[in-house]
Amino acid sequence: MHMNSREGKAILALIREGDYAHAGEEESIRLVLDHIPKGQPGPILDVGCGRGGTADFIRRQSWSPMVGIDIDATSIAEASQRYPQVQFQTANVEQVADCFSDKFGMFFLFNSFYAFPDQALALEQLRKVADDSAMLVIFDYTDPVGKFERRESSVARFDYWRPLKLAQLPEQLKQTGWVLHSVEDLSLYYVQWYRQLVSKIQHKRDAIVGQFGEAWYDFVEREYSDMLHCMEQGWLGGAIVLAIVH
């Protein structure tokens, strides 16, 4: 079982009542858009778009044209069917420069960066398809002062996670062709959002069990309860990071 599987994404869509796989759903998208300078040029690439709800929401706020990519072909097929006004394409962010000849003016990464196996390569690839005035927007988990690395073993299954280390971020961006513009800590928002999410999971227990089975409900409830525990302990936070082309 994995939350990035087809079933996991479908369960999240059921819980969140929309095709969103990131914290805060529409509230967080609006919060991110409020940080974008007016008149920022497009086109826009949503990296790790999942089932497409976020890309379509941004398009409906007049941020267009929109392109969404995800490594999961099933999610891309579903997104293309649901949101035909957005261009979706199956692509690995670590090879994105081989997929597009056009340049993008904006990149959105909503809770996807933490899961990239090679984050430096991903940033380098995005720089190659960025125009000279492009902006990179990373909405993601943070590891406050290395606390997530030292968390208790009961949540060791999150070992593949690579949340942002804010102290190292300026150099990480600089080495890959970007310059840090701003960071806003959203850790308190994340606690609030995940408390709400765990409550929604428990409230929708019968629907989850009915469609996906008892084992999936137990897995999802434990997964997000443990994430909330990490946030409440200060081991895991969240932030909006804006970067511009170096």
Image: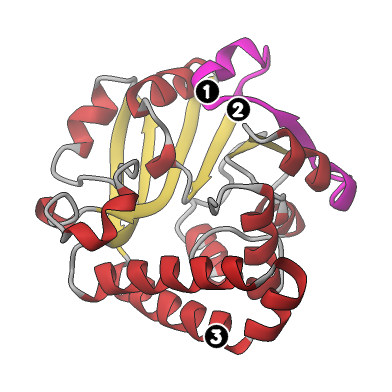
Span of residues in magenta: 80-104
Up-down relation of residue 184 to residue 49 (above or below): below
SS for dot 2: strand
Q: Report the residue marked by disc 2.
A: 104
Alpha-carbon distance for marks 1 and 3? 42 Å
Q: Which of marks 2 and 1 is nearer the N terminus?
A: 2
- Kind of residue indicated by mark 3: Gln
- Residue 73 higher or lower than 161, as above or below: above
| Amino acid type of the residue tagged 2 in the rendering | Phe
Quick check: is 93 in the magenta stretch? yes
In the image, which is nearer the foreground, mark 3 or mark 2?
3
Depicted 126 relative to depicted 73: above or below: above
Residue marked by disc 3: 202
> Looking at the image, which residue is at 54% across and 16% down?
95
Camera-side residue of 211 and 236? 211
Does the magenta segment cover residue 230?
A: no
Between 76 and 186, the one nearer to me in the picture: 76
Q: Which residue is drawn at 28% across and 29% down?
A: 173
* Residue kind at label 1, given as amino acid type: Ala
Left or right: 60 as drawn, with respect to 45: right
Q: Residues within 10 Å of mark 3 (few under 14, many from 20)?
A: some
